[in-house]
Amino acid sequence: MSAALRPAETAAPLIAAIAAAAGRHDRDGSFPFDSLALLRDAGVLALTVPAALGGGGAGLRLAADAVREVGAACPATALVLAMQLGKQAGLARNQAWPAALREKVGRLAVTEGALINAARVEPELGSPTRGGLPATIARRTATGWRISGHKRYVTGVPALHFIEVLARTDEASPRLGMFLVTAGTPGLEIRETWDHLGLRASGSHDLVLTDVEVPAANAIGLAPAATWRGSDAVQAAWNALLVGAVYTGVAQAARDWVRGFLRARRPTGLGATLATAPTVQQAVGAIEARLIGNRRITASLAADTDAGTPPSATESGAVKAVLSANALAAVQAAVALAGNHGLDRKNPLERHWRDVQCAGVHVPTEDAAFGAAGRDALLAGDSE
C-alpha cells in the first residue's frame, strides 16, 4: 500500500469503492466523476502539488504506486490520475510558467481537486511526437491570444478545469507553445467521440476550439518551431512510469482474479483445484515474474529520477515499452488460464483484457521507443 493511500483502513474502502464502480462505467461508457471525487476527498489529486502549496509534495515513486493501485481498481480513473499527477509535478518545476499561474493551478488542485491535462493530438497531425506542426492556430489580440483548432483523445476532458493546448502562432516564423485554457471559456466544445475497446470510461473525447480567448500570461514556453521541445528527461521518466503503472495495475487485477478462479475451480478429472497442477503453477509464476519485473523496474527508475539523476528520454521510452509488453503478456496469460471464463463478460477478466490493449498506443509507441533505443545502440560514437 503506497503512502498516498494510507492509512490502510481508509485506503481499502476507497479502492474497493472505485473498483465497484469500474464495471458500470465500462458498460455505460460513463465518466467516473464519483471515483475522482473519492480521490479528491482523499487528497490524492494533489499528491504531487508542492507541500508549500498544501499538496503532498510526492515524487515519482510514490505517484507511480498510487496510480498502480488505482489502476488495479479502475484503469480509466487511473489514467486521468496519471495525467494529473504528471502535469502537477511538471509545472511545479517548469520555470517557463509564470509563478503566479503555477501557484494558482497547484492551489486549486489542493482546495478543489482541479484537474489538468494537455491537448496535443490532432486529426491530421496525430501525435506531435512524430513531427509536424499542429493545425491549431494562436493569433495575437490586444490582451493575449485567440486560439482555434481541433484536438483528439483529451483524456478526462469532461472533468478538466485546466487544459494545456499545443498550438502554433500565426507569425511569419511560427512559434510553438502551450496555451493554458480554463474550462467553460467561450468557444470550447467537447465532442463525445470516445467509443473504444478499452478504457471506455476515460472520457478521452475531442475538443474543438473556436476563437478561444487566452490571456497573454497563459502562453507558456513559446519557442521557434524548429527548437521547441515538449518535454525533458525528467518529464519523459514521469510519463513512462505513470502510464506503465496504469497497465501494471490492470495486470495485477487480472492476476488477482485468475488466482481466485484457479483456487476455486475443481475439474472432476483432476480431483483437486487447478491451483495444485504444476503446469498451472508455472504459468501463474510467469505472470508473477512480469509483475515483479514491472514493480522493480519502476522502483529503480523512479528512485533515480527522484534523486535528480533521471535516465535519458530514450531509456525512459524503452522502459515504457517494456512495462506495457509485460502487462499485455501477463493479462493474456491470465485469459489463457481461464479459457472461456476469461472472455465471459460477466467476469472482470474480459474487461481487464480489453483495457490492457490500450497500453501500446501511448507515446512513445513500441516502434518509436525501440527505434530510438536501436539507433543509440548502433550509432553511438559514430561521427555522423
Image (tube, grey):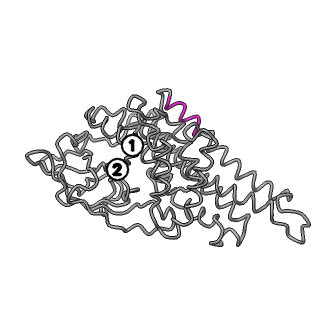
Q: Nearer the viewer, residue 354 or 364?
A: 354
Residue 305 painted magenta: yes
Q: Residue at x 65, y 61 (%)?
A: 332
Residue reaching furthest right?
271
Q: Is residue 266 among what the camera can see?
A: yes
What residue sits 59% from the left and 39% below the top? 6
The quadrant of the rendering that contains the C terminus is top left
Magenta span main SS: helix
Query: Which residue is the site of mark 2?
Result: 118
Tell me where residue 367 appears, x and y as whole percent: 48, 54
Q: Is residue 374 visible?
A: no
Residue 285 screen position, x and y as percent: 75, 51
For image coordinates 85% across by 70% down, the residue present is 267
**Image quadrant of residue 95?**
top left
In the image, residue 212 lies at what x, y percent? Answer: 19, 55
Mark 2 element type:
strand
User: What crowding class fits label 1: few (fewer than 14 Cα within 10 Å), some (14-19), or many (20 or more)?
Assistant: many
Dot placed on the residue nearer the N-terminal end, 2 or 1: 1
User: Which quadrant holds the N terminus?
Assistant: top right
Classed neighbour count for the residue bearing mark 2: other residues with Cα under 10 Å, few (<14), some (14–19), many (≥20):
many
User: Relative to residue 310, is residue 74 depicted above or below?
Assistant: below
The residue to which callout 1 is attached is 87
Q: What kind of residue is marked 1?
A: Lys
Q: Give, as a three-letter code, the residue at label 2.
A: Ala
Give, as a single range, the part of the protein colored magenta: 298-306
Contact (Cβ within 8 Å) of mark 2 with mark 1: yes
Q: Is mark 1 on a helix, strand or loop?
A: helix
Task: Give how far apart the Cα atoms at labels 2 and 1 are.
Answer: 8 Å
